[in-house]
Amino acid sequence: MSDSRWTMTRREMLGATAAALVLPLLESRPLAALTTRYNFAARVFTPAEFALVDELSDIIIPTDEVSPGARAARVAGEIDRRLADSLDPPQVKAWHDGLRAVEQLSREMNGTTFLKSTPEQRIAVVTKMASSEDETPGSRRGRRANPKSSIGAFYRQLKGATVRAYYTSSIGIHDDQHYKGNVYQQGDYAGFLPTDHLQ
Amino acid sequence: MTIVLTPPPEPKEVDLTETYDAIVVGSGAAGGMAAHVLTSHGLKVLLLEAGKKINVEAELRSMQWPYDHPRRGDAPPGWHALSLNEYNIRKPPYAAKNSAYKHVWSYVGGWGGSDYVKDILVDEKENPYTGTNYAWVRARLLGGKTNIWGRLALRLSDYDFKAKTHDGYGEDWPISYSDIEPYYDRVDTYLGISGFKEGLPHLPDSLFQRSHRLNASEIQLRKALLPMGRVATPYRAGVTTDGVKNKYRSKCFGRGACGRRPGGCDIHAAFDSPTGLIYPAMDTGNLTLRTNSTAYEITVDKNTGKASGVAFVDSQTHKALEAKAKVVIVAASTLESARLLLLSKSSQHPNGIGNSSNHVGHNFCEHLMGPGVTGLVKELVGKEHGNEDGRPGGFYVPRFRNLKDKQPGFLRGYGFEGSGGKSMFPDSTDRPGFGKAYKKEVRDYAGAFINMGGFGEVLPRYENAVSIDPNVKDAWGIPVLKFDYTFGDNEKKMAEDMATTAKEMFEAAGIEIIGVDRELLTPGWSIHELGTSRMGNDPKTSVLNQFQQSHDVKNLFVVDGSSHVNASCQNPTWTIMALAWRSCDHLADELKKGNL
């Protein structure tokens, strides 16, 4: 069992969280407006938090000329699902705190909440968050310098979760990446070796 | 496309009043091979497996898209996989009985797609161990770890079998390549292996079925290595690409995405012990299979001192039972086999059966992992990609150190496994930034990265050992293993060299270095535990003879990786099976002659 140890995404390989406590399943909160919009009831995020994550994720991976973005891929819902299933209170708290910090930053920079800010102002907030984070690509095992600030740490978490949820979605795999594998191949499958290039 | 696979054969009734010709303990690569060979000789065999038989196809769901799984492949809440950090900051046992998690697995459960292996890996809570830090990955079910193995299938050479003659360290094996070559051939033919002939003396070619293709970045590496006298060859996979005569297995259809999960193939193109060996053996009518049978002692005839059978507990009912046979074959995996021998104490064998040498549990060795490199092939950025992961693996760079040269800092060698090319989950998500520019970069850079990681030979040393810890018991009340195992200076020096040469090879290929890993992973990470009951000609310094037969107890055989005299740096599964085949041929012959 070897190859997959190197072909897994570099970040994911050590992605397991170190925290080791379990809390009772978090109380589900009804989400009248968003439930209608997404046909989905968030388990960890409040309606306001959910809307914020939804917008942040769509700023990180927006719709472009090739494919729909994170909102269409229901990334916020998958982040909430994974967070609820993690049964990991420190991680859940980190998200609540991180989202609060985003609002705080928005009020400092824009004088209003994130979602009431203009699109340009929202991007300015995310740009500020990103600038607090060292995004130097890591090695295979993804070791990078520790984040320089708590907002940088949250940006890293937010981007990582968005990326994971988006690129495991149907939109991410097919519409955006045009991934051609995971199909039965007939006859000389793509792995067939014409030996010429090996000489 | 319809794949028609035959369902498993109906199991025979287990009769514990019968004295079987042979009992085989363990159903992985070694135990499956023993069952196949002995039943083909007409012997009546009872195969005991500690784990259960599961519907493995339903478990693996090899082609399920992440978005079709309710949790994107994650295991249910409350299941936890150990991280590298947990292995390093704490000592085993890693999962306390009162752990808040419902179930805890080894790190393999954390590779993504953990839902697909949750019933294959053991629960660490039920299977503790103690001592030094060690990432011990175990799979208890019919077929053991072959259900999820990495399928790199390599041969050893006389650089390995005669390593002492070559460099003076350790012991030579009591066999040469010429002794085992015909059995490698048989394994190749019976089970199927794909690869490309290179004619290397230190990595002998197999009887290959058609290989897969290297991707563009891998070809670039191959071309750069040839003038350096090094090779990047297509991953030699224990996968049948042209098909084998076996109604339980399909040939490979390059369905791909084989790298995104811990392993496993639900059409059994990749070798696994149940479909490759055990089901056909059951079809001979000579094999009786009992799963849920956790062996804890090899019983001994008080008059002769010979093995008389195996005592085991039913894994589900915890009821103690016993089976009898003329010959006992231990194939429970390197460490579990040592545990079973050491637990089997009697007045005739006070140190454990077959252990008059005091070598059982010692000379424990494996492959070190950690050092490696990630690079970017700039020429591929923005290029169109086809189906590039529709294949069993990437590439392999065989050993090149200490063959003709002599390294000043360390003995023996290492190889690299790696891959490049586009995969289902893009390898480019580490790009900085966000927004449309980031999204385009992920698209443009996807498939432009290449990486490889080393597997190095850990020298066998007597002081690296496992023993029984009488104070800690597993869920069945059986004393557990205590580890006393560390890497030495040779391993550390070798690891430094691995990182250096990995970087140098990528640079030679014009690949931009993104990152170099230099640190060793926790011992055990390679899942290639070997040694602990080594073969040899001298009963004072070895446990088994060249036919994996106990020097002390002639009707006792240990046919798994325990018997290896050194680890070499090549992945061991194919050698385990070739050796087991050879030994079981000999065993059947000896039994017929009345010599056991």
Image (spheres, coloured by chain):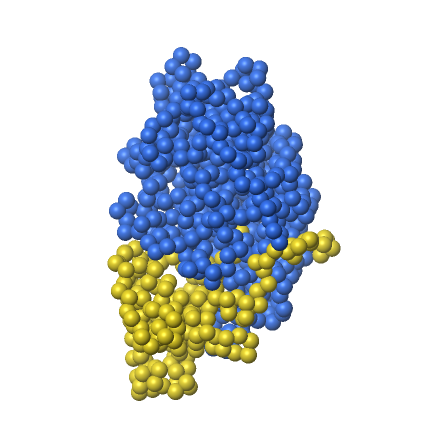
Q: Is residue B300 left or right of residue A98?
A: right
Residue at the spot x=59%, y=58% of the render?
A183
Work out which residue is located at the far top of the displayed protein and give it: B303
Q: Name the residue rendered at 64%, 41% in the picture.
A: B244
Residue B508 in percent (x, y) is at 62, 60
Residue B586 on image: x %, y %? 58, 23
Q: How many marks?
A: 0
The blue-coloured chain is labelled B
User: Can I make out residue B27 in this image?
Assistant: yes
Left or right, B255 with respect to A128, comes to right
Residue found at x 46% / y 71%: A73
Q: What residue do we see at 52% from left, 38% from top?
A: B8
Q: Colour of chain A?
A: yellow
Q: Foreground: B200 or B317?
A: B317
Is residue A71 toward the left or the right of residue B575 in the image?
A: left
Residue B374 or residue B410, whichever sits in front: B374
Residue B36: which quarter of the image?
A: top right
